[in-house]
Image (cartoon, coloured by chain):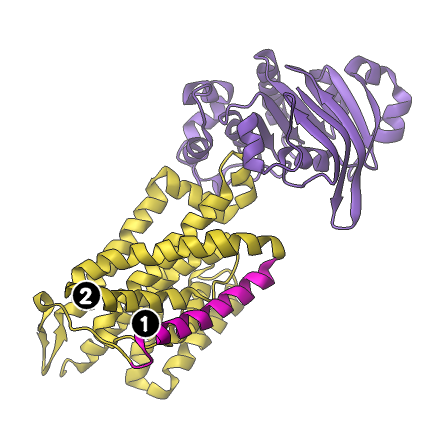
């Protein structure tokens, strides 16, 4: 479905991604793990077109999307939930959904079925939503664009445990419906709990690519690259 | 009371509505495209001159105020699609230089097409005369200008606040990158907003024509004040531009009564004060 091969991305003169190769199969959930500044978010931004790769290819469903504009990438079927959530401060929950909705795969009823907490907040503006509500809305806003692949950047960050649980169950529900997911997470336990494959990135290079179970068994990798158990 | 003070205040509101129309367009462009469109005043001047041509050709001022916003918006679409969009890749400085160049080009084009002498048109016959106020009277046309501006400002506000397209524009002012990430062609959106913004300036130019006439540099005088209005009201805030415009118009009028020499200074002093106390402007959110 999605295949990155040999992707190099720069911010100005800084070389951030160095030959990243990564695959998300149809309907698969892949966790992309790594320390702060390893290149996780940049990988997602490169896929959605917010930064253009300087080398390598980003292939989605057999066609090259590397360097395409973000709205083109979204219309191809890739939706993005950014780390900072980036909720529109002046728009109500309903307006977020209205401007993002394409097709009829995600009617309101289905959205609010996945995130019941949002239903009573339909007329509330983005700036008045809590962090957890913003996170749910950011995911909902991505879903209503009708994607086949969802990119999630640190969905659990800064959220209360009860909200994290809600976010996890929404990820599981989306996975069970056959949506492919590329999940960037600091929380290794959480990520490996929902993913079937995992990749580890360090200093812009993929240092591990395998199943979630394989990574679970590699305490050495987790200690070296993810700071787990140290 | 002879009515002179009332007249002065009413004139302040008339001028304020012009500022509000111009600044409403400017704040949309400035807030969303993140570039100070120094050519905004040039579109205001072009609005006045296109109106002059329509009136000269047809004798119909009503036709002029219907046609001018469309013509000026069309010009804006062309400028944005062919110039601003390309320059966005080169950076803000180039866009600023380009709009400054556009001001000079527009001014010279006006001199070439319409001549350097001031132009004017008569107030439409239906609005001849005025409301008596003491020893003087207040022209009907000025009341019409206030009502028409209020109507347009209100309609644009409703479109921004109550429609899906308005929501897209508000989202674009907040975070254009994220708008692109939900599948909306932000470049196209920018172009449309640019067209609407300069169309409002063109309408203001047409409306002021029967009162002040047109002269090639009329846009420049308006520009500095309009930036002050946008800064006072809050960058990107539509309501701020409208309230700021009326506030600045009234301030000018009141200062003209109290101490005419300081009427210009007062506006920029107010702007400086707002920046110091509330840098995001009265209605700004950032």
Q: Position of residue B263 (x, y in %)?
A: 36, 81
Give the residue number, with chain letter if any, for mark 1: B249
The tint of chain A in the picture is purple
**Front residue of this view, candidates B138 and B270:** B138
Disc count in the image?
2
- Tell me if residue B239 comes above or below residue A2 in the rendering: below
Quarter holding residue A30:
top right
Residue range in magenta is: B91-117
In this rendering, the label closer to the viewer, 1 or 2: 2
Quarter holding residue A188:
top right
- Tell me if residue A208 comes above or below residue B150 in the rendering: above
The crowd level at tag 2 (other Cα within 10 Å; few <14, some 14-19, many 20+) is few
Give the residue number, with chain letter if any, for mark 2: B57
User: Between marks 1 and 2, how big is the CA–CA gap?
Assistant: 33 Å
Q: Position of residue B93 (x, y in %)?
A: 59, 63
User: Can residue A135 be seen here?
Assistant: no
User: Can residue A174 be seen here?
Assistant: yes
Q: Is residue A122 magenta?
A: no
Of all chains in the rendering, the one displayed in yellow is: B
The crowd level at tag 1 (other Cα within 10 Å; few <14, some 14-19, many 20+) is many
Quarter holding residue A46:
top right
Name the residue at 40% across, 68% down: B41
Q: Quadrant of the C terminus of chain A?
A: top right
In the structure shown, which secondary structural element does the residue marked by tag 1 occupy? helix
Task: Say whether disc 1 or disc 2 marks the residue closer to the N-terminus.
Answer: 2
Horizontal side, residue A81 vs residue A114: left or right: right
């Amino acid at each position: 479905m999605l295949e990155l091969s040999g992707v190099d991305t720069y911010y100005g003169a800084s070389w951030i991604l160095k030959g990243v190769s990564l695959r998300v199969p149809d309907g698969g959930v892949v966790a992309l793990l790594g320390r702060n500044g390893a290149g996780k978010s940049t990988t997602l931004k490169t896929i959605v077109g917010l930064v253009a790769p300087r080398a390598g290819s980003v292939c989605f469903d057999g066609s090259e999307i590397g360097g395409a504009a973000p709205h083109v990438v979204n219309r191809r079927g890739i939706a993005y939930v950014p780390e900072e959530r980036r909720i529109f401060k002046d728009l109500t929950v309903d307006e977020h959904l209205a401007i993002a909705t394409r097709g009829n795969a995600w009617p309101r009823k289905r959205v609010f079925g996945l995130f019941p907490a949002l239903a009573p907040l339909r007329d509330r503006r983005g700036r008045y939503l809590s962090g957890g509500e913003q996170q749910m809305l950011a995911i909902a806003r991505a879903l209503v664009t009708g994607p086949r692949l969802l990119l999630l950047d640190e969905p659990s960050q800064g959220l209360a445990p009860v909200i994290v649980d809600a976010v996890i169950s929404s990820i599981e529900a989306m996975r069970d419906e056959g949506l492919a997911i590329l999940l960037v997470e600091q929380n290794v336990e959480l990520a490996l709990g929902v993913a079937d494959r995992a990749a580890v990135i360090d200093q812009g290079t993929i240092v591990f690519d395998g199943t979630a179970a394989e990574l679970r068994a590699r305490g050495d990798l987790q200690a070296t690259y993810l700071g787990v158990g140290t | 009371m002879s009515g002179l003070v009332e007249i002065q205040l009413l004139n302040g509101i008339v001028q304020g509505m012009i500022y509000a129309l111009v600044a409403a367009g400017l704040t949309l462009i400035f807030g969303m495209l993140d570039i100070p469109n120094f050519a905004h005043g040039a579109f205001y001047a072009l609005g006045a001159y296109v109106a002059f041509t329509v009136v000269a050709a047809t004798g119909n001022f009503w036709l002029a105020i219907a046609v001018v916003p469309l013509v000026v918006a069309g010009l804006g679409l062309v400028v944005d699609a062919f110039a601003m969009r390309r320059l966005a890749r080169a950076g803000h400085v180039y866009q600023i230089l380009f709009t400054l160049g556009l001001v000079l080009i527009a001014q010279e084009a006006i001199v070439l097409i319409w001549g350097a002498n001031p132009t004017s048109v008569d107030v439409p016959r239906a609005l001849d005369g005025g409301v008596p106020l003491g020893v003087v009277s207040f022209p009907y046309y000025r009341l019409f200008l206030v009502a028409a501006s209020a109507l347009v400002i209100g309609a644009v506000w409703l479109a921004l606040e109550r429609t899906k397209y308005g929501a897209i524009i508000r989202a674009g002012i907040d975070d254009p990158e994220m708008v692109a990430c939900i599948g909306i062609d932000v470049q196209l959106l920018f172009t449309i907003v640019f067209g609407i913004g300069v169309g409002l300036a063109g309408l203001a130019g047409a409306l002021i024509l029967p009162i002040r006439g047109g002269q090639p540099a009329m846009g420049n005088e308006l520009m500095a004040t309009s930036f002050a209005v946008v800064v006072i009201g809050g960058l990107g805030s539509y309501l701020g531009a409208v309230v700021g415009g009326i506030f600045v118009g009234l301030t000018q009028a009141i200062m003209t009564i109290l101490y005419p020499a300081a009427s210009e200074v007062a506006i920029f002093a107010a702007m400086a004060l707002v920046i110091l106390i509330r840098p995001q402007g009265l209605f700004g959110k950032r």
